[in-house]
């Protein structure tokens, strides 16, 4: 590429909940942008991470996982995922290969993957998806090669994919090959973001995401994914330090004791871990203060949907 020829490509990461989309995004960007936990459906909105490769800017869109929606928030999350796919130059369909192989061994299919393939096929035939569609089989390090080959052949039969990649987002295997493909597919054009920018998320939202991640890590299966974190105050000090005040919103009074913990130990641990990570991310000392509040029906608040970039009427 010539020095005067810049390229910019939008890449949508699409997959079932917990397929590894957020891990893949963070690996390409080189920083933690999107929430990564073992709990499914934790990415609520489209989170953009920016990676620079020479004169090419890759804008990754980490979409919410595609699953069978049951309530308004679910519908809005799935709607955001499809919107991200339709706007992208390349759609990367990420499949948890280990889960898919285990299901096939028991004569079953991953219903979420089947839903994604059907939706993308319909969108491509209708002209709603004009970009390339590639398959990234994730978590390959945990599968025997013969089982992986059988799964690859099965998924390729749809004729939907322009290319197939085998990766381990966690270990970094195969990511260079995927990145090389994405760079080659990026159209010529001006960069949309400055070259030192890692995400288009405001720092207040990044701070909230980090605290929410720590809550999920510490609570395991005890707390529902509907837990939300709101950054209510951000105060810059003259010495460069920052005070951040946050509220953890939960929907039921019975959940408050679980988040706070015996003698306040759980919320203390969440706060300390989030504060440490934020200080490292922002490269300055962070003073984090966290409260827990019961906010019934917060998931039906239109303002909250707008904050997450979701369509309330989806």
Image: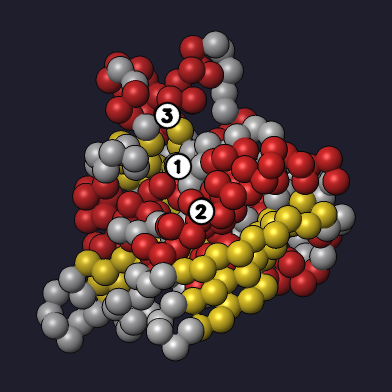
Image spot of residue 307 (x, y percent): 67, 71
Secondary structure category for the residue under label 1 = loop
Disc 3 versus disc 1: nearer the observer? 1
Displayed quadrant of residue 166: top left
Q: Is residue 292 visible?
A: yes
Crowd tier of the residue under label 2, counting other residues whose Cα lies within 10 Å: few below 14, some 14–19, many 20 or above = some
Q: Name which residue lies at 82% across and 50% down.
A: 251
Image spot of residue 238 (x, y percent): 44, 88
Q: Name which residue lies at 63% across and 76% down.
A: 233
Q: Nearer the viewer, residue 225 or 134?
A: 225
Secondary structure category for the residue under label 2 = helix
Q: Position of 156 compared to 236: left or right?
A: left
Crowd tier of the residue under label 1, counting other residues whose Cα lies within 10 Å: few below 14, some 14–19, many 20 or above = many
Q: Position of 1 compared to 73: left or right?
A: left
**Residue denoted by label 1:** 20
Q: CA distance from mark 2 to mark 3?
A: 35 Å
Image spot of residue 51 (x, y percent): 31, 66
Q: Nearer the viewer, residue 172 or 101?
A: 172
Secondary structure category for the residue under label 3 = helix
Q: Nearer the viewer, residue 150 or 246?
A: 246
Q: CA distance from mark 1 to mark 2?
A: 26 Å
**Residue denoted by label 2:** 272
The first of marks 3 and 1 along the sequence is 1
Q: Position of 38 compared to 295: left or right?
A: left
**Residue denoted by label 3:** 97
């Amino acid at each position: 590429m010539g020095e005067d020829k810049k390229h910019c490509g939008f890449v949508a990461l699409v997959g079932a909940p917990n397929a590894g989309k957020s891990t893949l995004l963070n690996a390409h960007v080189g920083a933690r942008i999107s929430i990564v936990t073992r709990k499914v459906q934790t990415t609520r909105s489209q989170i953009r991470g920016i990676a620079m490769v020479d004169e090419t800017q890759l804008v990754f869109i980490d979409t919410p996982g595609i699953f069978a929606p049951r309530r308004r928030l679910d519908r809005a999350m799935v709607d955001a995922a499809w919107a991200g796919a339709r706007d992208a130059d390349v759609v990367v369909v990420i499949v948890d290969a280990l889960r898919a192989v285990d299901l096939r061994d028991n004569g079953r299919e991953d219903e979420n993957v089947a839903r994604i393939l059907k939706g993308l096929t319909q969108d491509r035939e209708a002209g709603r998806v004009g970009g390339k569609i590639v398959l990234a089989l994730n978590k390959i390090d945990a599968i025997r090669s013969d089982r992986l080959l059988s799964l690859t052949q099965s998924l390729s039969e749809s004729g939907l994919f322009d290319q197939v990649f085998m990766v381990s987002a966690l270990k970094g295997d195969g990511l260079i090959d995927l990145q090389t493909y994405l760079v080659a597919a990026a159209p010529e054009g001006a960069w949309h973001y400055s070259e030192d920018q890692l995400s288009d998320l405001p720092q207040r939202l990044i701070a909230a995401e980090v605290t929410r991640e720590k809550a999920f890590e510490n609570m395991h299966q005890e707390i529902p994914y509907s837990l939300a974190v709101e950054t209510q105050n951000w105060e810059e000090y003259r010495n460069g330090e920052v005070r951040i005040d946050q509220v953890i919103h939960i929907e039921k009074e019975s959940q408050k004791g679980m988040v706070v913990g015996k003698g306040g130990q759980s919320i203390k641990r969440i706060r300390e871990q989030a504060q440490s990570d934020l200080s490292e991310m922002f490269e300055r000392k962070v003073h984090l203060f966290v409260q827990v509040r019961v906010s019934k029906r917060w998931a039906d608040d239109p303002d909250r949907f707008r904050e997450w970039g979701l369509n309330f009427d989806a």
